[in-house]
Image (cartoon, rainbow, N blue to C red):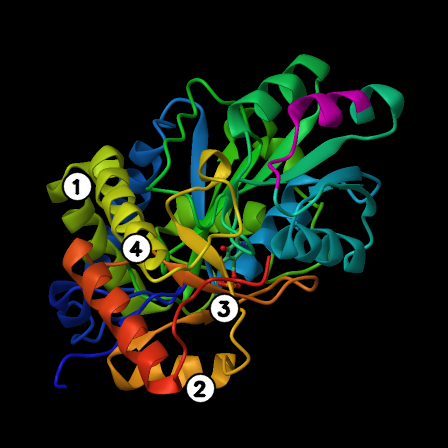
């Protein structure tokens, strides 16, 4: 097979040839040509959330988690008290990184197969006046469940609480409109639904809270207020930028706009999702989540009940046929995950289902039906 393996993961993702080709050039980090790319990219990122009037965007080197950490460090004061509704692994990660930097954190545990209920968040905020901010994971990639961003943003606004949104796996695919949904910070990254390559994140920060962010960060490298000021003043990144990643993301955003922006991307991913779930259902596989709470981003499937099933062998079989699957992240039940995002369409999803069918046959497994 001379095609690169198709990545059915939550990032890095399969990218287009155009995006890959955009990396075949060296850029001087101080040079006006590169600064122009950064400026254009920032402006187009803000357009995606309709935030030109209300928000700035601050890019940051590193994987997505670096930007989540930077957003918390920058936006919340050191004596902040953060509520983290928790229905999965990325919620737990956000809570942990906040705790490690000395913020007070309270968890609101929710079962992993359910979205966070806005009413539960409201009740918790009303019961504890010391809470200052909420951290919300928009699409909890650990399972694929979509949390109610608009409802939670509205109740935070009503109560004057800050809101930090990890929209890493939803940004550019699910609708997010800063004119309608108020957030203090919203975090995403290059290597997810914009279909760039991994290596940088970016954080939208509400202009009204930006000035007050000065001095919050315990860390020099994570200080988005400083990064923003420097960028505004010089047009440059504070420290060495991931130049090739920036150029690739700029090219990926051009293709995003050509495709028709967020609605078109959501439509393609939704078709990928339907093709995948329909095909897998014919093989007997059952998704972990009810369709109503599932985002068309990544699907968690129950492992087959058959005693011959073993994730490692299943993974290797799919890989041999050109598809990279993803392990499950649940502790209670055995699962695996399949991403619907990246520069792929329903054809690749049909081929992926065929690869799974052939792999099951090779393993001597008659069907994907789970134990329940
Ligand atoms: C991918 C992702 C992240 C960032 O993960 P990295 O491995 O640091 O890139 C954070 N939150 C969510 C919800 C994600 O899907």
The residue carrying mark 1 is 257
Q: Is disc 2 placed on a helix, strand or loop? A: helix
| Rendered residue at 40%/68% (across/down) | 367
Q: Residues within 10 Å of mark 4 (few under 14, many from 20)?
A: many
In the image, residue 268 above or below residue 141: above
Q: Looking at the image, is mark 3 or mark 1 earlier in the sequence?
A: 1
In this view, the mark in front (4 or 3): 3
As drawn, the label of residue 276 is 4
Q: Position of residue 326 (x, y in %)?
A: 45, 70
Q: Looking at the image, is mark 4 or mark 3 earlier in the sequence?
A: 4
Determine the CA span between mark 3 and mark 1. 40 Å
Q: Is disc 3 placed on a helix, strand or loop? A: loop
| Rendered residue at 28%/86% (across/down) | 320
Q: Is disc 1 placed on a helix, strand or loop? A: helix
Q: Position of residue 328 (x, y in %)?
A: 55, 66
Q: Residue 138 versus residue 158: which sits nearer the camera?
A: 138
| Rendered residue at 71%/45% (across/down) | 216
Q: Position of residue 358 (x, y in %)?
A: 27, 78
Determine the CA span between mark 4 and mark 2. 20 Å
Q: Residue 86 versus residue 31: which sits nearer the camera?
A: 86
The residue carrying mark 3 is 304
In this view, the mark in front (2 or 1): 2
Residues in magenta, as a range: 114-123
Asked if residue 119 is among those painted magenta in the image, a careful observer would answer yes
- The reply to whether dot 3 and dot 2 touch (C-beta < 8 Å) is no
Residue lying furthest top? 158
In this view, the mark in front (3 or 1): 3
Determine the CA span between mark 4 and mark 1. 25 Å
Q: Position of residue 127 (x, y in %)?
A: 88, 22
């Amino acid at each position: 097979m001379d095609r690169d393996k198709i990545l059915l993961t939550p990032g890095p993702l399969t990218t287009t040839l155009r995006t890959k080709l955009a990396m075949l050039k060296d850029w001087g980090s101080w040079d006006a040509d590169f600064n122009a790319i950064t400026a254009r990219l920032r402006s187009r990122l803000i357009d995606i959330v309709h935030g030109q009037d209300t928000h700035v965007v601050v890019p940051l080197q590193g994987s997505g988690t670096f930007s989540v950490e930077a957003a918390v460090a920058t936006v919340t004061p050191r004596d902040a008290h953060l509520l983290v509704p928790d229905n999965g692994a990325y919620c737990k990660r956000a809570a942990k990184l906040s705790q490690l930097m000395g913020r007070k954190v309270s968890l609101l545990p929710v079962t992993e197969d359910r979205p966070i209920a806005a009413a539960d968040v409201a009740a918790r905020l009303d019961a504890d006046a010391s809470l200052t901010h909420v951290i919300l994971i928009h699409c909890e990639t650990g399972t694929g469940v979509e949390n109610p961003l608009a409802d939670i943003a509205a109740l935070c606004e009503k109560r004057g609480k800050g809101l930090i949104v990890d929209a890493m796996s939803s940004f550019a695919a699910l609708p997010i409109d800063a004119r309608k949904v108020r957030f203090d910070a919203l975090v995403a990254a290059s290597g997810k639904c914009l279909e760039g390559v991994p290596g940088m994140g970016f954080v939208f920060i509400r202009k009204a809270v930006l000035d007050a962010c000065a001095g919050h960060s315990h860390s020099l490298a994570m200080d988005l207020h400083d990064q923003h000021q420097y960028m505004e003043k010089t047009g440059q990144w504070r420290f060495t930028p991931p130049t090739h990643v920036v150029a690739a993301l700029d090219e990926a955003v051009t293709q995003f706009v050509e495709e028709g922006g967020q609605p078109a991307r959501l439509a393609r991913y939704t078709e990928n999702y339907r093709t995948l779930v329909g095909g897998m259902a014919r093989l007997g596989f059952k998704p972990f989540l009810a369709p109503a709470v599932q985002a068309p981003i990544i699907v968690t499937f129950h492992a087959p009940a058959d005693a011959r099933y073993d994730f490692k062998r299943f993974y290797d079989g799919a890989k041999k046929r050109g598809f990279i699957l993803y392990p499950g992240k649940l502790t209670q039940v055995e699962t695996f995950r399949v991403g619907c995002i990246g520069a792929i369409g329903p054809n690749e999803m049909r081929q992926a289902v065929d690869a799974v069918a052939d792999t099951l046959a090779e393993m001597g497994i008659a069907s994907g039906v789970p134990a329940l």
